[in-house]
Amino acid sequence: MQVGKHDNNYEYDLVCIGGGSGGLACALKAVELGAKVACIDPQRGAAGIYTNVGIAYKKHMHQACLLGIGVCQAACYGWNVRNARKLSMNWQKLISNIKIATERVAKTDDRMKYIQFFNGFGSFVDAHSVQVKMTSNEELLVTGKYILLATGTQPVYLKIPGSLEYGITSDEFFSLPSPPTGKTLCVGGGVVCMEIAGILIGLGFNVTVMARSKVLQAFDQEMVKLLMEDMTSRGVVFLQHCLPKSIALARCKRLLVSYNNSQKKDAEEFGIFDRVIWAIGRRAPLDDINISAVNPALNDSEIIVNEYEETTVPNIYAIGDIASGRPKLFPVAVAAGTLLAQRLFSGVRQAMNYENVARAIYTPLEYSFVGLTEEEAEKLFDKNGIVVHHGYYEPLEYALTHHSRNFCYMKVIAKFDEHCPVLGMHITGPNAGEIMQGFSAAINSGLTLHTLFDTVGVCFTNAQNFTQLLNEKK
């Protein structure tokens, strides 16, 4: 633990409003560098640092889906599996075990004892003062030289009749007390919506995805099409270009959802479901923190920051989901928080590199990528300014299972010049995220097509196919 010089003009050197992944990472690094730090959060405390609950739950549920599929396919590998088709899901046991596992991996960190935790809600009084309403209803005022906003975001409801009464959010889905039997309507077109739909179908439940326009609009559309085709083959129903209009309780005690279909001139259509899950986006709780008291520049519900996470108010910073234009990813927030503390308390000026951050989508057929989509590359360099190597591949995991159709596909996008630097890599298939982690480091280190194709792959791995991807798109 370094010993820093505390600014006596304020009670704390750093006050973090929000004790999630980014806020805690910044607080921990700050106390390591000798700063006096306060952290305000209604759900965090000195007991330990918890992994992001939503991320942990969805990954465990994704694994549950894969195990169910594996049991059904075990006979193809010679296992005598009785009644594999009669597998059933014990939802309560799954949720209970995930909760236990999530709590078990809670990390204890010796630096935690140097942070002053306030279990409550923080709101601005001015640029250096924060009013704290404790969960015990006690109120107090804390001051800090620097204030960090790391509140994260909250799921939103569509403002239609019946939305609040009969719908639940994506956050609530992961703690449902009983199994989601019957028909579920998942409204949204983003990653969370697709992952929840994948979990539901993978665990044997009926699910329909309704999207206002197209699903995963910001992603590579060729890869998205493969994901949708795979999920459709498993039983997911997609209603694109549809917008819910109202939800009501029908006489049969199920939910009657009316919606407009823009592909049919906004014709009103109806569907009967047993539950509705809202996964239409998230918003930062700006009103709750009284953001108008300091008035930083905003982009809708997000706070505008520069490359050093500084808002337009000199001593106030923002990281994570609340910051405009940043990838909404757990490891990004952690890295940004750590670097911010180093800049504030050790004089380091290194900024966070937000380029080429890899990510994975945990649908039944995983999709992972790093860098540009093909659409983005064409927009930046023109279609003739890029080269795309691509191809389907058959994972060894599928070789004996007699899949009727293969949706496993990969492509490499490179700039078309003498060096051919790689601009993006995309893959659908088993363990896609694990594969992309290494290629992410390679791209950030200047990977070229020549280097990639000169690499000797690891035999019988799916990643090896990237080194042999000689088929060029015409």
Image: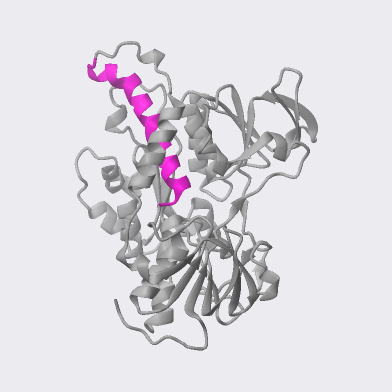
Q: Is residue 415 visible?
A: no
The magenta segment: 51-79
To which quarter of the image does residue 291 belong? bottom right
Q: Is residue 350 above or below residue 154?
A: below
Q: Nearer the viewer, residue 96 or 194?
A: 96
| x and y percentages locating residue 251 in the rendered image | 76, 19
Q: Is residue 155 visible?
A: yes
To which quarter of the image does residue 61 belong? top left
For residue 12, side relative to residue 460 (left or right):
right
| x and y percentages locating residue 354 in the rendered image | 45, 65
User: For the point 28% across and 54% down, which residue is it?
Assistant: 452
For residue 462, side relative to residue 403 (left or right):
left
User: For the point 44% across and 59% down, which residue is it?
Assistant: 45
Q: Nearer the viewer, residue 240 or 304?
A: 304
Magenta residues, dominant SS class: helix
Q: Quadrant of the N terminus?
A: bottom left
To which quarter of the image does residue 130 belong? bottom right
Q: Is residue 126 above or below residue 422?
A: below
Q: Is residue 173 magenta?
A: no
| x and y percentages locating residue 7 in the rendered image | 46, 87
How many discs mark residues in the rendered view? 0
